[in-house]
Amino acid sequence: MKQISNLKEGCDINLFLTASGLWFICVGIQSVFLPWVLISVHHVSPFEFGVAQMCLMLPVLILVIYGGYLADLYPLRGLLTRIYLLSSLIALLFAVWTYKNTLTYSILLAYSLLFGVLSAFCAPAREAFLNVLGQRQLQKFVTLNIGIEFGIQVIGFVIGGLVSLLGISLMFMLLSALLLSSSIAVAKISTTTQSKQRSGLLTQTREAFSFSIHHPVILPVLLFNGLIGVFFLGSFFVAMPLHLSQLEGYDASLLAVANIIFMIGLISSVATLVLMGGINNKQQTLIITCVLASVFLAVMPFVFNRLWMFILLFCWGYLGGIALSMGQTLIQENTPSGNKAQVLALLMLFFMGGNPVGSFLFGTLLEYWNATSVGVISTVTMVVLIFVISYKHKLWNSHYDNTNSAT
């Protein structure tokens, strides 16, 4: 019976990781072909580019708390199945539209907003379901899931880099097919969670927020993820593509290769953590990797050699993978099961919600200032805030009890 149970759990986690991987292949496709349309087709200004990237994550900032509330309330398998299915239908709708009409700037913003809404509901449900399915080896599966979430985007980058050959309408068709497959994979998972007694959104949110801000580890980790969202994601989605467009011979394939190399670095960090069997001093590792990664914000605008740029992106991805793994593991380990999805929604709010703030910030700064000045100012600001948060919350030497009650 135990062997059958282990096989069942193994099958469920494989289906979950498959569905998550398909979703992030789509994210990878969009990370290349949407910026390519903006830069190479519409020739938008840095400010317009920042606004477009902001729209992709702006709904997360607004709706992710409500998404966490729903994830705590409804069965996770059914919720994720419906989210993936709806995203497939939206991509299909835009495939039909772009086949008959031109993808204008305003239509592209509309798609970004719609996909951002679905991401706001998907992210907390996905992270909460991972905790249910992978609770016996939590750090391992959190690390593997991060590796899949980011690493498998390499496939999406390759596909997105073919947009000039395949066309925009076919890209949306591929997105629709992949997202439909993701929905089917989740629907086949045998494990689910039970519906919970309905309670007020404000009450649950207040409880999760109160717990988080008074926890000695969760609060600084949330703040760190906010900094990563604003400075790292903002730089990655706005400053980096705009900088690459200044290199000789820029096209969609160069942006795809840059994204691939970044993800190879992230995959390498995940492989390192898995082979090491995890890290005990997670807080110190989080601080060190964030500081080192911040330095690349200042270095990148000075690099115009492709080889050195690729090395820089690899190292940045490696450090980013370690930082994300440490942060998510600390949140998972320290959050009780009663409001886990809500606390995870706060994590998504700080991390993914920081993206639209960072995208708008970097787009605006780059509209008026040169890239080197923006890079240096961003690095100094990030490093100072890291040390302030670490010192104020005594994160470097803090000790905590693992309160993960999923087990």
Image: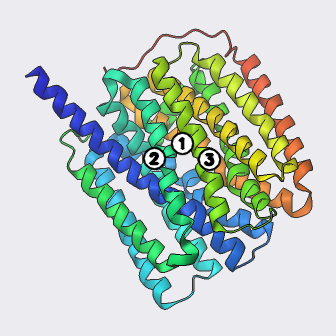
What residue sits right under mark 2 in the picture? Answer: 123
Image spot of residue 7 (x, y percent) = 17, 31
Taking the image as shown, residue 215 lies to the left or right of residue 390, namely: left
Mark 1 Cα-neighbour bin, 10 Å: few <14, some 14–19, many ≥20: many
Residue at point 78% right, 45% down? Answer: 308
For the view shown, which residue lies furthest in the bottom direction? 100
What whole-number distance in Å separates the C-alpha atoms at marks 3 and 1? 25 Å
Instruction: Examine the rendered structure and indicate whether residue 346 appears above or below residue 112.
Output: above
Left or right position of 386 against 56: right
Q: Is the residue under label 2 in contact with that under label 1 (CB below 8 Å)?
A: yes
Q: State the residue at coordinates (84%, 41%).
A: 298
In the rendered image, which quarter contains the N terminus? Answer: top left
Tell me which amino acid carries mark 2. Answer: Ala
**Residue at left offset 59%, top offset 20%:** 217
Residue 193's image quarter?
top left
In the image, residue 19 sits, relative to residue 4, either above or below, namely below
* Quarter of the rendering containing residue 124: top left
For mark 1, give the secondary structure.
helix
Front residue (pair 194, 209): 194
- Name the N-terminal-most of marks 3 and 2: 2
Of residue 336 and residue 399, the one placed in the foreground of this image is 399
Q: Is residue 193 visible?
A: no
Q: Which residue is mark 3?
A: 261
Marks 1/2: CA distance? 7 Å
